[in-house]
Image: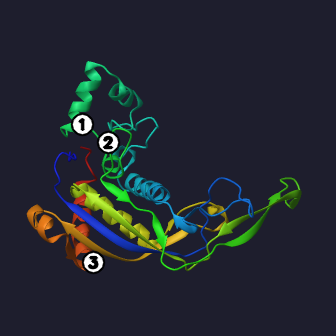
Amino acid sequence: MNTFIELKNRYVLKGTLRGEEGLHIGTGVPGVDTDAPFIRQENRPFLPGSSLRGAMRSTVERMVRSLWGPAACCTLFSEPSAGNDCWAGNKKVREKLEQATSEGEGLRRDLAQGKGRLCPVCQLFGSTVMAARLKVTDARLKHDQEPVRRDGVGIDRDTETAADQIKYDFEVLDRGCEFEFSLHLENADDNDLALLYILLKELEHGMDVGGKKSRGLGRVMLTAYNVEYFDARWGLAKFLTEGLAKEEKGAFEKRLRGKFDALVKAGGPNGG
C-alpha cells in the first residue's frame, strides 16, 4: 500500500463543472433576506470542496460495490461487509489505532510502513486513519452570478395542499452556471487510476451535489478538463526543475481506461 513517506507521482486535473439544473448549497443558517442563503466566500457563491468530495466518494463507493460487491470497499462508520477487512471501516480496529497501547502503536507503525489494510476507496478519498490521496478544491464561479430566490411551502400530509403559515424561501444558482475546480492526486497506484476513471466518467454523465435534490436541483456535469503530472515517465528531478508535464486528455483517458479494464479483468480491486 502506498503511503506518503515518499513522493512517487502527482496528477493535477483542472476542470469546469456546469450546473445542468439549479444549485443550492446552503449555509444551514437563516439569513437576513432569505431563510436559506447560498454559501458564499468573499460574498461570492461557491461549491465547497468538502461537498464535492463527499458526493464524489459516495458516487465511487456505489459504483464499486455495484461492480464487484459489498466486499470491494467499506462503508465508513458501518459494520464491515463479509470479506472486507478495511481498518477504516472497522470500529474495533479504529479504536485500537487511537489507543496509547503497544497494540495501537504497532497498528500505527504498520500503517506508516504501508502494511495496513485499507480498501481502495479509503485509500483514494481518505479516512479517519489515513489522509486522502485525492484532494478536491473549492469550485469557484467562472463568471459573476447572483443566486435567485425561490419560494417553498410546507405540505399538509392529510390534504396534500399547502399548509397554513408554512412558507419559506431559499437561494438557487440558475442552470448554466460554471465553476472551475481542481483534483490533486498523489502517490496513486493502479487501483486509484481505475477509480479515477470511474469518477471522471460519472462526472461527465452528471452528478448531484448540494441540497433540494428531491426538487430536481443539484445536477452538475464535467464539461472540460486538462491534466498535468509527474510520474516515473516524467521523473521527480524533471518535475523539480521544469514543473509538471502536460498530457493530452485523450492519452490520459486511454491510460485510465487501461487501468479500469485491468481491474475488471482481475475481478475488482484488492485492498492495501
**Helix, strand or loop at mark 1:** helix
Q: CA distance from mark 1 to mark 2?
A: 8 Å
Which residue is label 3 attached to? 249
106 or 241, nearer to the observer: 241
Q: Earlier in the sequence, mark 1 or mark 2?
A: 1
* Residue sitting at x 35%, y 57%: 135
Q: CA distance from mark 1 to mark 3?
A: 34 Å
Q: Quadrant of residue 259?
A: bottom left
- Give the x, y percent position of residue 138: 45, 63
- Give the x, y percent position of residue 205: 45, 72
Which residue is label 2 attached to? 130
Residue 135, above or below 216 = above
Q: Is residue 100 left or right of residue 222?
A: left
Crowdedness of circle 2 by 10 Å Cα count: few (<14), some, many (20+)?
some
199 or 132, nearer to the observer: 132
Question: How does the figure colour the protein chain or chains?
Answer: rainbow
Q: Earlier in the sequence, mark 1 or mark 3?
A: 1
Q: Earlier in the sequence, mark 2 or mark 3?
A: 2
Q: Tag 3: residue type?
A: Lys
Q: Tag 2: residue type?
A: Met
* Residue sitting at x 35%, y 23%: 99
* Residue sitting at x 40%, y 51%: 65
Q: Are marks 1 and 2 in contact (CB under 8 Å)?
A: yes
Which residue is label 1 attached to? 111
Crowdedness of circle 1 by 10 Å Cα count: few (<14), some, many (20+)?
many
Q: Are marks 2 and 3 in contact (CB under 8 Å)?
A: no
Q: Quadrant of residue 15?
A: bottom left
Residue 8, above or below 243 = above
- Give the x, y percent position of residue 108: 26, 31
Q: Is residue 239 left or right of residue 260?
A: left
